Each structure stands twice: as C-alpha cells, then as structure tokens.
C-alpha cells in the first residue's frame, strides 16, 4: 500500500535550501519516492492555513517512508535545511 509524505513550507532562505534539495532528491529516489505535487499554491475552499505551498511525495509503503526518514543518510542531510524554512511534514498511509 502506498504512503505519502506531505509537507507545507514557507521558504526563509532559498540559498540555504539549495544544498539540501540537491542531496535529498537522490536519497528519496533510493527509497522509492516519487514527486506528486511540488511547491503548489493552495486554492483554499474552506478553513484556514493556505498561506504556504504544499508538496506531496508517494512512497511504496509507510515502511519505506519511515526507512527514509529514520535513515542515517537522511540524518546527515536534514541539518542542511535548518533555519531555511518553516516546515510541517506529515506521513500519511494510502489506500
């Protein structure tokens, strides 16, 4: 069953994110992630919280998503984005 990693992010420093993006893309691919939505502006139909773009990545399974997130390789990359964005990230099981 697929799983999805959804993130909502407000960029503070594009320069700070550049190195992170270069490193994280091939690592996500290694764990089977595919981009579904990348940096899309939200068209809010109801509720609140549409001021930050959303990205969505599909993983082959929730286990693959957690394997990526908890990997030593990602632990080494994650600090590269520190202070460069306000970010919320969710892991969502698919159907």
Image: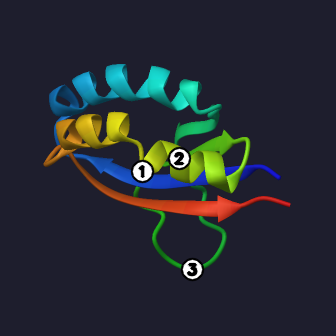
Where residue 23 appears, as percent x and y from the top left, is 34, 23
Badge 2 is on which residue? 67
CB under 8 Å between discs 1 and 2: yes
Q: Which residue is mark 1?
A: 70
Q: Quadrant of the C terminus?
A: bottom right
The nearer-to-camera label among 1 and 3 is: 1
Q: Residue at x 34, y 40 (%)?
A: 72
Disc 1 element: loop
Numbered circle sitting on residue 19 = none
Q: Residues within 10 Å of mark 3 (few under 14, many from 20)?
A: few
Q: Nearer the viewer, residue 28 or 73?
A: 73
Determine the secondary structure under disc 2.
helix
- Residue name at image x 16 percent, y 32 percent: 16
- Front residue (pair 65, 22): 65
Q: Assign a secondary structure to mark 3.
A: loop
Marks 1/3: CA distance? Answer: 32 Å
x, y (%) of residue 66?
A: 53, 53
Q: Is residue 41 visible?
A: no
The disc at residue 47 is: 3
Horizontally, is 36 left or right of 52 in the view?
right
């Amino acid at each position: 069953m697929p799983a999805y990693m959804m993130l909502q992010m407000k960029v503070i420093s594009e320069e700070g994110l550049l190195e992170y993006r270069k490193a994280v893309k091939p690592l996500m691919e290694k764990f089977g992630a595919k981009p579904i939505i990348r940096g899309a502006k939200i068209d809010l139909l109801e509720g609140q919280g549409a001021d930050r773009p959303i990205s969505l990545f599909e993983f082959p399974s929730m286990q693959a998503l957690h394997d990526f997130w908890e990997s030593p390789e990602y632990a080494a990359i994650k600090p590269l984005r520190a202070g460069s964005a306000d970010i919320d990230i969710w892991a969502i099981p698919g159907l």
